[in-house]
Amino acid sequence: MFGVDTSYASLATIALGLVTFAVALRHVSARKLHPDEPTVLPPWIPFVGHLLGMALEGSRYIKRLGLLHASEPIFTLPVPGSRIYVVTEPSLAALVQRSAKTLSFTPLVPDITQRVLGLDKGTVEIVRQNLDPEPGGPRGFLADVHDLVYGLLGPGEYLSSLSCVASQELCLQLDAYATSVAQPGQQARAVNLLAFVRHIVTVGTARYLYGPRNPIAEEPELEGAFWDFDHGLGSLMIGIWPSLTASKAFRGREAMVAALTRYIEAGYDEDAEQLVKGRMQIERDYGFSTEMIARSSLSFFFAGVVNTTTTTFWVALRVFADAALLNAVRLEVEEAVALSEETTGPASLSIGILKDKCVTLLAVLRESLRIGSENFSVRLVKEDMRLGGRYFLRKGSVVQIAGGVIHADKTIWGDDVDEFNPQRFLAARTDSGIHPAAFRGFGGGKTLCPGRHFATTEIMVFAALIVHSFDMSSPDGGTVRVPVKNDRVMPVHVLEPRPEDCPEVVLRPRDASPSTEPQPTVQNAPKPLRFGDVPNKYEIALSELQELESEPLCHRIAARLLVNNCQLLDGRDEATILTDSGKIARDFVDSFAASLAICDLERGSFRIPSACAQFRESALAQVPAPVRPRLHVSPGEVDNCLEGLAQSDSAWNTWVSYRHKALRFCEAARADNERDQHIHVFERITKILANLTEEVELELELRLQVLDTRLADTTSRIDHMAPHVDDLKDGLLRVKRIVSEVIARRAEDAAATVKDGLEDARNLQQLLAALLATVLENESFALAQQNALQTASYQANTELSVVLTTLQAAAVSSISLQQELLESKSRADEIIRRQEAIETGMETLAGLADALTVQHDDHQRALNHAQETAEQVLGTLESVSSSAGSLQSSILGVFGMTRWWPYLLCPVTTLIVGSYGLPPSAMRNVVLLGLGEAAGVMISAANHYASTTTHADPLNGSSPLNRSSTCSPTYLIDDITVYDSRQQKYFEAF
């Protein structure tokens, strides 16, 4: 009975110990590493609780923590081996974005791409080289790709051409669908809107990026494989046995990689866009294999398809779900179409006019991104630092700007933050007071999406075509419904609804015929540039410079100032400009870029910093044309303006884009100057050559006259010498004939002599060969005999050594044997003496045995009497124990319990353990106390059952007087009997 109580007490002790250990771990994990470290939020399970929360709840977990601790602009999540600093305040996010040297995303790229794309170790090492190069220092793969993508997708001719090509391709896909539905006998059927948009964007993007022989066109089933890869991206990013834990995504990725490899090996990439071909060329230059180029291309295809698809789905659905919003957007689109047809011709849609007129559609796009995008802008802390001079960040930790938390902050967006309200972005066109870093739809800082301009154009055009050309309704004819986004996944892109929540819609073409559907165009846009016929950089720069003549006044003035001052650059490249901080040339470039950027920002109704007043159009118009190169502002004013532009990601990146072009403009200007100088030099050289040619012609005429005179004199003399020459020729022929005959005889004699000498030499050679063969044979025989003698000598030495060793061993053995014989003799004498002592002892033992036999009988009678007395005492004790147990059960039964401690300890334990990880409330405490009382009832019932079992079998206790005790007299008698028999056998043997 007491043993059962002890076991339950041990369990309770263990439970209390575990609870104490968990509380201690939670306290340790919540400890700050530095007094100024951001507030630490302890995990509900020590160390791994936050990782489990993010894995199970996705972006919802971080969003819930951020909103629960809204007063903390940054907080710390402890994870095994590191810390995650979550930033939830826009101004602090802007500080993170500006600290690019200490907080960088690029060190995370190699490992992420290896897990997601399956890059091999060699390729990952290539990607890892020179991740964050210093100006003028060695560059790496990521830096070169960054420059290519940002250069081509920045505002300019190529971006306009690519946007036009992409929009036309999407328009063709929509037109094909509208034509198929409008066929006689065909009727519009319900389609999954998300799947419908996915198909059009996937097929269209593959075609305009990778050409007509792209993998999706060659193998249409790869479309499903690509989306399998997309939906399992979070599992692939974890990187633990992806073929098992993310098998569907893994198979989809490998199918796409195999198809892209075949595409590249077949040479179909020659028809790809310049952006794709340029990226592939960089990868080849860095030594990527064909398969690794294919894996890298998969990431680029992913970037061009996924966010465009999901955002277009939300934009179209939001517009058609609100009748008033649909009417407003349609009016803007129809106005843009009408103005485009007046400008560029019938059935056309100017992208520039569309973006300028459709402000409501752009607001719907931005609001859809605010609600649907919960991305994390991630940075690695490269060195210990203080963010904003206040928050300490540990080296090796990760900083996450939580876009989902910022997008759901009521202090930024208002009390209707959870509602879809595009008006908030229409108000932003004037002056909303919202921090520029609060909108995280395209990221921010150095990781700001380079294709944001292209994506915005593509989504707006695609959505405008759907709104203009189709009516959308639910299958029952009602208004379409907007599902809830699925925020329980890792936010690797704009969030989608759950598959079962995706709405079915019916798309019917409007009254307009599909053939009259407007085709997207770029006003006065040239043909899209292809990689094979790209003009050189000077021609591109000159064409862009000439196009500025049709731009606003501020563009033209800025271009004039730059061209007049470009000669100061004197052949410097961009790296030299960046490092040559003491030269005024950099200020010219920065000033030009600031002028153009502010001009664009003014046209977009952005708020211009007061420090940039000297760069606005009104100020530029008053700047006179400089006679000599000079700045119309001071270097300090340039720096102040740049600091103001840096407060906004859009303004800063617009300035960076124009700054890249500034150097190209100056190079073009220098090329023109050099060309003019070369022309002047060529003109002077031509004049000099003309004068020289006249003088040479006169000199040549005089020389030719002298030569004619001398030639005539020479001819007459040759005529006089002709007879003498004939006589001399005849004599020479006679001499030749005589010499030939003598030489022929001498040659024949010499040939005979040489022939005889050769015959003698041949015989001598044969004799020497035979002699040499005999010498070699004798030498081989002598060598063989020498080897045989050496072998025999070695064997003889070996056998002699063996014989000597054997004799030595035999001598040692003989000596040892003699010593052992002497020892054996002494041992035999000792054995004889011991046998005599044993005989004496045995006789003594025989007498003792007789005495013990008599005493044994007396002891047996005494033990029998003691056993009877013990049995009586045991019976009395069992009766007393049974009575006490009954009395105890009766007393405890009156109170309804058999043990008091479970009813007290279990509720307290459940209340303490359950308080972590659950929000505090009275209902939580009541439920936890109820669970503890239930556990106490179960433990008490188990104790009562164990007590009943113990009372039912009292003879199986642990009493030392039990009947099965090994101290029983019966066993003692048996032991003595066995001893007597063994003693008798020994005597007989002896």
Image (cartoon, rainbow, N blue to C red):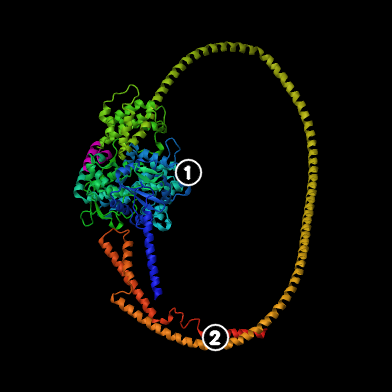
Per the picture, the main secondary structure of the magenta-coloured stretch is helix
Q: Which residues are magenta?
A: 332-353
Name the residue rendered at 79%, 38% in the picture. Answer: 761
Q: Which mark is residue 461?
A: none
Q: Quadrant of the C terminus?
A: bottom right
Q: CA distance from mark 1 to mark 2?
A: 95 Å
Instruction: Say above or below: 746 vs 713.
Output: below
Kindly report which numbered mark, 1 or 2, lies closer to the viewer in this rendering.
2
Say whether residue 436 is visible. Answer: yes
Q: Is residue 511 left or right of residue 838?
A: left
What amino acid type is highlighted by mark number 1? Gly
What amino acid type is highlighted by mark number 2? Ile
In front here: 279 or 970? 970
Residue 676: image quadrant is: top left
Provide residue 46's location: percent of width, then percent of height: 37, 57
Name the residue rendered at 41%, 27% in the picture. Answer: 570
Q: Is residue 496 magenta?
A: no
Q: Is residue 449 left or right of residue 472?
A: right
Provide residue 297's location: percent of width, then percent of height: 41, 46
Provide residue 111's location: percent of width, then percent of height: 43, 49
Q: Is residue 335 magenta?
A: yes
In front here: 771 or 47? 47
Instruction: Say above or below: 341 vs 177.
Output: above
Residue underneath mark 1? 287
Provide residue 627's location: percent of width, then percent of height: 33, 21
Q: Earlier in the sequence, mark 1 or mark 2?
A: 1
Residue underneath mark 2? 973
